[in-house]
Every structure is written in C-alpha cells, then in structure tokens.
Image (cartoon, rainbow, N blue to C red):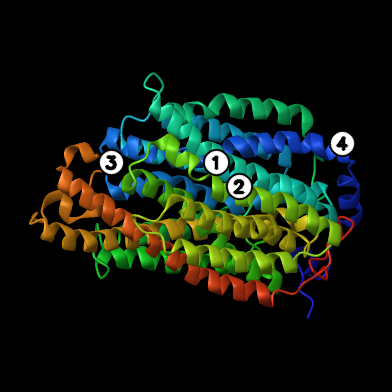
Amino acid sequence: MTIKSPAQTGPNPVDHSAELAAAYPEYSHKQIMRILSGLLLAMFVANVAGTVVANALPTITATLGSTQQQYTWIVTATLLASTASTPIWGKLSDLFNKKNLFLIGLGVFIVGSLLAGASPSTIYLIAFRAVQGLGLGAMMSLTQSIIGSVIPPLQRGRYMAYTGAVIAVATVVGPLVGGFLVDVSWLGWRWCFWSAAPIALAAGVVLQFQLKMPKTSGRTDTKVDWLGAALVCVSVCSLLIWISFAGHSFAYGSWTSAALLGGFTIATGLFIWVESKAVNPIIPLWLMRKPTTALAVVASIAVGIGMFGASVFLGQYYQVARGYSPTAAGLMMIPMMLGVLLSSVFIGRWVSSVGVWKPFVVAGSAVLLVGFILMSTVRFETPLWLIAIYGLIAGLGVGMTMQNLVLAVQNSVSVHDVGAASAVVTFFRSLGGTIGIQVLGSVFATHVRGLLQTRLSELRVPLTGEVANPQSMSLDFAKLPKPVADAVRSSYGDSVGQLFLIAAAVSVVSLAAVIFMKGTRLAAKLNTSESADNKG
C-alpha cells in the first residue's frame, strides 16, 4: 500500500514538485564544501560543549556540592532539552529558511553557554545547561536537514562521513578540554562553558557568508503545529523526570509517580491524536509507519546509549574508580572515539562508492554488540590496555551505524520531508541516550550501594549518612576516611560493567531491527517530488 504524506491527501492535493526542484538546485563539490565548512564548525563546538563536562563533572560537583543524582542531571538537562526540541527544529526546517533557523539555534546555544559558566549553584547550572540543549538540538537536527537538502543520497554518505568524524573528534577533544581547564588553576571549570561562546560566534560568522540556502521551501502551508510541539515536550519531560527521581525522591507507588506517568500517558495520547489532525505535524505519523523509519528508530536507541552513556560513565570510572586526573581520563577515551572516527570516514565513503547502506548498518550493529559485551567485563582492576581495545571495538560499531541510519531514512523520503525524517532518527537516538543515562545511572547507584554494604561491613564501618546512599553521596574523597574512600572506588570500578551488559541487551534488539530493514540503493538525484513513498 502506498503511504502518502499529508500534502497528498484531500480532494485537491497541491503538487509543489516544480517549485521544489527550482528551490533545491544541484550544488558542485566546491559549493558543498563551503556549506559544510560552517556546519561542521558549528557541530564541532556544539559537540565539544556536550562532552566537555564528562571529565570536568567530578570537579564541578565537588565544588558546587552536588549529589550523585545531580551529577547525572547536569548531563541529562542538556540531552533532555535537545531531545525534546529536535523534532520541532526538524519540522520547522521543512517550513522555513534553514539558514536563519540554524543561526537562531546558534544564538540560543551561545546564551546558554555564557549563563552556564556563571552559575552560582548546581540548580542554576542544570537550568542553563537546558538552554544550551535547545541550541544543541537545533544544530544537530538542522545539520542533517541541510545536508539532506543539498546532497543527493548516493553522494551523501561521503559527506556525512565528515559529520561523523567531527562528532568523534569533538567527543575526544571535549573531555580533554574539560580536563585541561579544571586542571589549570587560573582557568577553572567555568571556562568549560565560556570557551564555547567565541568559537560558536565564529561559526555563526562563517555560516552567514558560506551557507547559501533557498529562501523558501517551495511550500505555502507553513502553519506550525505548536500544540504538537508542546505535547511532545510534556511527554518526554514527564517520562524522563519519573525515570530520574522514582525510587529515590519519591516511591514508585506514590502519587507523584502516578502523576508523572499519567501525564506522560495523556500527553502521548493527545500528541498522537493532534498529529493525526495537524496539517504539518511535528512528527508525521505516516513517516513513523514506514518500516525503514520505524526500524531505524529502534536501532538508534542502542547507538544513543553507546554515544552518551559510554562518555559519561567511563569518564566517571577513570576518575572515581581509578583515580586519574580529568585530563588523563580524557586521553583514555581516545581509543573509543578513534573507532568512531575511522569507521565514520571510511565506511561513509564506501557506502557512497557501492551505493547501498544495509550491509554496513548490519555489520556495525553486530560490532557494537560485541563491543558492549566486552565492555561488560570491565572491573576495578581490568588492565587499561584491554579497556582501550574494548572501547575501540564499540567505537567502530557506533561509527558504522550512526550516520548510515539517518541516511537510510533520508533516502526513503522526498526533500520536502527530509527535515522531519532526519529529526525523527536524531530524536530517538538522543531519547535513547537520555533515558539510558538515567536508567543506567539508577542501576549503577544501586549496584554500588550493594557492594558498599558488603565491603564496609567487612571494615565495620556503619552505613549511615552519605555512605548509606550513593545517590546523595559527595564525590569529594578528601571528606571520606581512606578505608571508606578505597571501598567506594573499588565499588564504582566493579559496578561499571553492569551498565554495558544492559547496553548489550539493548543492542541485541537493535541488531534484529536492522536485519529486518529493507535494503535499498541510494538515489543519484535529490527526490523533489511531493511523494513520500520513494521506493526506499
């Protein structure tokens, strides 16, 4: 059965194909590289800002007196805001000027960075990190949308390899920069946020002169689905807040839990109903019914957990369990990100060369599963060289799947809907990472507490105060007696493997999803028709 977009329904559908073809001309390699120069610079600073706190978090939380629960929320606030806003930015890019939207998102990101650096407390830092996340959501979503509007699918893998490489490099550079800044006494952790502002401003200048996009999308039905946008935010936020606080700040069977889960259920139901009626839905339901999109969404969840969870909890493992400095912990993340870099660049070019994507996505999902299984064996005394090899393997899997899942979905729709299509995959990848961090953080704290009960009882240390609950424990080891500090370090080190065992279980589902995806050849030209039923 042919699946049609809303533009095709109704008694008198309007065909904008000719307008779209004129609005999206063919670009030369030189023109594409000029466009990418601005996009990649903005992506670089955005991803550095997203990962710069990975190794700086122990110092930040110790300085601000943050709890373990707040530790994860400093990261999650950014992911939550970017996740909830991603489909909104993506859909807006199908309706309005992509360049202007990108610059607006960049401005929001700069403001959030400046405010985050000036935060007087953890609560303010979490709030301003959310503002950063709104800008980050714009840049991540609109980058894919612009690439999908400029480059034909057959050549897209070659250029999207650059975006994967930038993400990989930024993921390495971010923790290193964060570690360096907190290690230098005359700079400090606040510069982890302030340093992003001038670089982002420079990216905006480059984009202003180099990014040349059509002034219109060839569409006249530009009514924005603000109700759908609000409902998706309420739905996502309710779910993530419940996952984060249930069992710690309130009981699973409490009225608070019921209110949050009820809010999530009602908001989700209303969202689906509103989207079925909206002229320009934020997440088009017809798009989600396409097998390629639905299966890509499932597969993206494991990639999200691998991207975000590994950087957060491995950084904590190296510093808290193994006692390394933030800078050294950043250096130890290089093998994993090297895997992402290598596979993104070489596999991206290979995909464009052979014109198919499925074999690489299946192979990447299998490699990611193997990497997570190996990482699940990491313990307190595991040799660092062995962890590096495991990380390299997991990184290869992430790099092979991350961009190619977006490419597969983009290849199945017209340029008319490429923004929404790209945003859907990015949205669920970020959602998977955000939920993953909260769930893994909760499992991590529970496992640490169980090990502490055993080890501290052997030392005859009473389980009272902070020691009784790792969720509220300060990570400032100078405040703990040495035997207790040693027990905490070993408990953290012996618990991290459990997180990757969970990630491996999710990866099994991801692998099954990509196996069932229908393999297609990449189109040599942009699809400027109104049809949403490309053979991909």
Decide which of 486, 337 is in the foreground and name it: 486
Question: Which class describes the residues within 10 Å of circle 3: few (<14), some (14-19), or many (20+)?
Answer: many
Question: Which class describes the residues within 10 Å of circle 2: few (<14), some (14-19), or many (20+)?
Answer: many
Q: Earlier in the sequence, mark 2 or mark 4?
A: 4
What is the quadrant of the N terminus in the image?
Answer: bottom right
Question: Which class describes the residues within 10 Å of circle 4: few (<14), some (14-19), or many (20+)?
Answer: few
Marks 4 and 3 in Cβ contact (< 8 Å): no
Q: Position of residue 370 (x, y in %)?
A: 55, 67
Decide which of 483, 122 is in the foreground and name it: 483
Mark 2 to mark 1 CA distance (whole Å) = 8 Å
Residue behind mark 4? 30
Q: Position of residue 528 (x, y in %)?
A: 86, 56
User: What secondary structure is found at the residue carrying circle 2?
Assistant: helix
Residue behind mark 1? 172
Mark 1 to mark 3 CA distance (whole Å) = 25 Å
Q: Nearer the viewer, mark 1 or mark 4?
A: 1
- Residue occupying image coordinates x 70% and y 59%: 404
Mark 3 to mark 2 CA distance (whole Å) = 32 Å
